[in-house]
Image (cartoon, coloured by chain):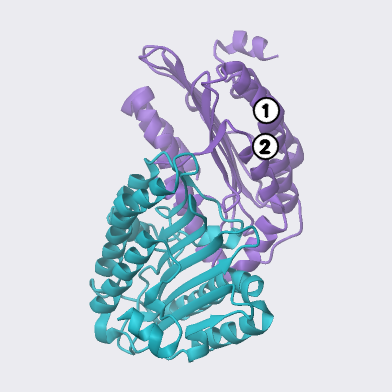
Chain colours: A cyan, B purple
Amino acid sequence: ASTVSQMDSGRPRFMDFPYASPPIKDLMIDLISTVESSLDSLLLPCTLPQDVQYFQNQSGTAHASLLLRSGSPSSTIDFILGSWLHCELPTGGALNITSFSSYMNNSTDAPHLVIEFIQSSPTSLVLILDLPPRKDLILHPEYLKTFYEDSELEKQRQVLDKIPEVQPYVSPSLYIRSVFSPTAIVVKVDTSESGGDKLEEILRDEVSNVAKQVLGIWLELCVLGGKRDVGDDEKVWLKKRDSLFKSKSIETDIGSTLPRMFGQEITDRVLGVLQASL
Amino acid sequence: ASTVSQMDSGRPRFMDFPYASPPIKDLMIDLISTVESSLDSLLLPCTLPQDVQYFQNQSGTAHASLLLRSGSPSSTIDFILGSWLHCELPTGGALNITSFSSYMNNSTDAPHLVIEFIQSSPTSLVLILDLPPRKDLILHPEYLKTFYEDSELEKQRQVLDKIPEVQPYVSPSLYIRSVFSPTAIVVKVDTSESGGDKLEEILRDEVSNVAKQVLGIWLELCVLGGKRDVGDDEKVWLKKRDSLFKSKSIETDIGSTLPRMFGQEITDRVLGVLQASL
């Protein structure tokens, strides 16, 4: 089906993931299909313009695709956002960033979801997998208990932590570091000593299962689970916090990568559309 | 002077650090002396009872000392708390925990201070060195900028991060993980391959200087620097947050260690006095 669509339009679709490594492609298709089928009518169709759903730079060395689906008015989802970015590197090789996030709206205080792979060599990548909290965990210990302690997310983090090739990763952005939960998986997988096959093996055998488990916990506990009581005052500051979180996350993440890959004109067009959708 | 005081009372004083390794003892005396002389009349004398200032278990295998000085009514300090705990291990060797914290009151929103060494072998220890934030950094990006980005605390973290024997440490407590700032130094220093002399060398040459720099930043920016405007609403939730932070930190930290070392009776007495002082 993806081949037909490529021939029809002359360009890849979001779900084609034409540049991701096979285990990442398979995993992302699995995760996003699970989200789309679980949420079903809670998600509206993607309304991004064609030239934001897919775009490339003038020289054809950088390609990207975005998917954005807003939640329906009755859902607790603000929107889901997927992206893949591919860029040939001057050194040979390529940089591939593949991500999927879900942002909640202020009818709930349940955590967001973020999944991201940043791969710049065949033998190493950065993996981010977390349910970013929406409340200060020191002021709200019951929130820490519900979403992070009782959910046993820590077990999933520990599965990857035990793998010798997996090391903690520290983002250069202090803001991004502040976003994550205490059970966040923020790691570098480096198989430069054992080769690219080992990286694919870790992705297929360990990372895929952990990512599916974390997604399952998020779907059950944060989206499809019981309704959360959110007071009017709380709605006001959740909206303010989410708004800062969304714009800062997208600015720090996509906004720092796009200019280097696609130049300022395409970046402004894409960020303009995204920010208008938020 | 410390020898005289030991002879006088038959027991070590807090500032004697009789069990800490020499570089940790020297560093703690330097740091606490700096705090006491910088804050001077802003700190009231220690009013802990003698049997909480120093205590030991029945068999004499565990010893501990606490120092608690409240801030004067006009200061921004709630109290400073120092502790050393020493416990002989059944395996031979000993566990030594040496810590110093400062808790702010709600006349300011500036960060707290925490310094802790947990050493259970001659060749490895856990070091915690941080200015724990008092606000949600996502909702308050200007707070992140003032205390963590502009203060260049990250430079200090990176000094230690570059040392091969220094690795990130992940606390088993999700609550403790949530307490730290994005520039927190939460590391394990492991010199089991190069020996105990190397550990002392890293402590003297690198850790001491970093700890003094971080303390200097905290004193200048959080205590002696310009007054922070804190509104009445903010004072209310800062008080609530600080109260949770203090009781949970002391409960998780001292409360989890003391029963195993000193039994429940001594633990109850010590925690009772501490909690009454908060």
Q: Secondary structure at mark 1?
A: helix
Q: Which residue is mark 1?
A: B27
Count of marks, rendered view: 2
Kind of residue at disc 2:
Ala
Q: Which residue is mark 2?
A: B211
Residue B136 appears in the rendering: no
> Above or below — where is A223 with respect to A269?
above
Tell me whether the residue at label 1 lies in contact with that at label 2, contact meaning CB atoms closer than 8 angstroms: yes
* Label annotation for residue B253: none
Structural distance between the alpha carbons of marks 1 and 2: 8 Å
> Above or below — where is A104 with respect to B116?
below
Q: Of residues B43 and A8, which is closer to you in this image? A: A8
Chain designation of label 2: B
Residue A232 appears in the rendering: yes
Residue at x 70%, y 14% (from the top left corner): B1
Residue at x 40%, y 69% (from the top left corner): A112
Query: Which numbered disc flags the more N-terminal residue, 1 or 2?
Result: 1
Kind of residue at disc 1:
Leu
Disc 2 crowd rating (10 Å Cα; few below 14, some 14-19, many 20+) is: many
Position in image of residue A94 (x %, y %): 55, 62
